[in-house]
Amino acid sequence: MVDSTNYMKKDEHGNFIGVGETTAIEILRDIYKTAKIAPQYPFVNLINDDYKDSLGDNYLKHKLDIVVFRDKDKTIVVRVQDKHHEGVLTSARDIVMKQILEWNDCIVVDLNWYECHFLWKEEKNDDSISEVIISLQDAGLEV
């Protein structure tokens, strides 16, 4: 199993920031100039109370990598997925969270490590921008 802490650092608030997240935020700010971009946003803040009662602590404490709040369009949840998301338990949790977020009118975009090689270098360039745009389009968004 991969130790995910090798891919993370802590921000000034004690949140874990994974590889690729900082660059993804920069790219998303360029794409969605008028949107509010919120890193490490609590999962429970995006779901209605009906779902909260049925979720365990892991879900209730979970923070989403990046949330893009657009004025007139659905909220976008961007998950920057490193290798540890391939594990059985983590991938199962990811599927459940994605479904709940979609039921709560969010669009979920996954930036997977194996599809975003340039993003993982934490370099904002044409290649990493293209990787993010392709992932947004794959989720049905027009960019």
Image (cartoon, grey):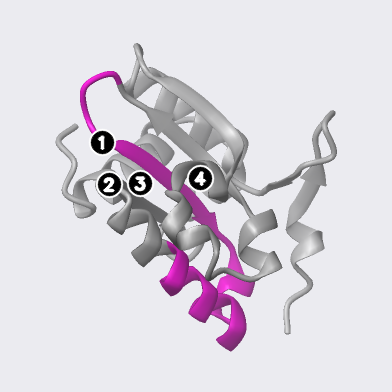
Measuring 46% from the left and 64% from the top, which residue is drawn there? 97
> Disc 3, disc 4: CB below 8 Å?
yes
Q: Nearer the viewer, residue 27 or 73?
A: 73
Q: Position of residue 76 (x, y in %)?
A: 35, 40
Front of the two marks 3 and 1: 1
| Side of 38 relative to 29 (left or right) | right
Give the residue number, with chain letter if any, for mark 1. 74
Amino acid at circle 2:
Asp
Quadrant assignment for the C terminus:
top left
| Residue 78 painted magenta | yes
**Does label 2 or label 1 sit earlier along the sequence?**
1
Q: Residues within 10 Å of mark 3 (few under 14, many from 20)?
A: some
Q: Position of residue 67 (x, y in %)?
A: 47, 36
| Side of 26 relative to 56 (left or right) | left
Amino acid at circle 1:
Lys
Magenta region, residue range: 71-97
Give the residue number, with chain letter if any, for mark 3. 131
> Disc 2, disc 1: CB below 8 Å?
yes
**CA–CA distance in space, label 3 to label 4:** 7 Å
Q: Position of residue 127 (x, y in %)?
A: 38, 40
Q: Is residue 111 visible?
A: yes
Give the residue number, with chain letter if any, for mark 4. 119
**Does label 1 or label 4 sit earlier along the sequence?**
1
Front of the two marks 2 and 3: 2
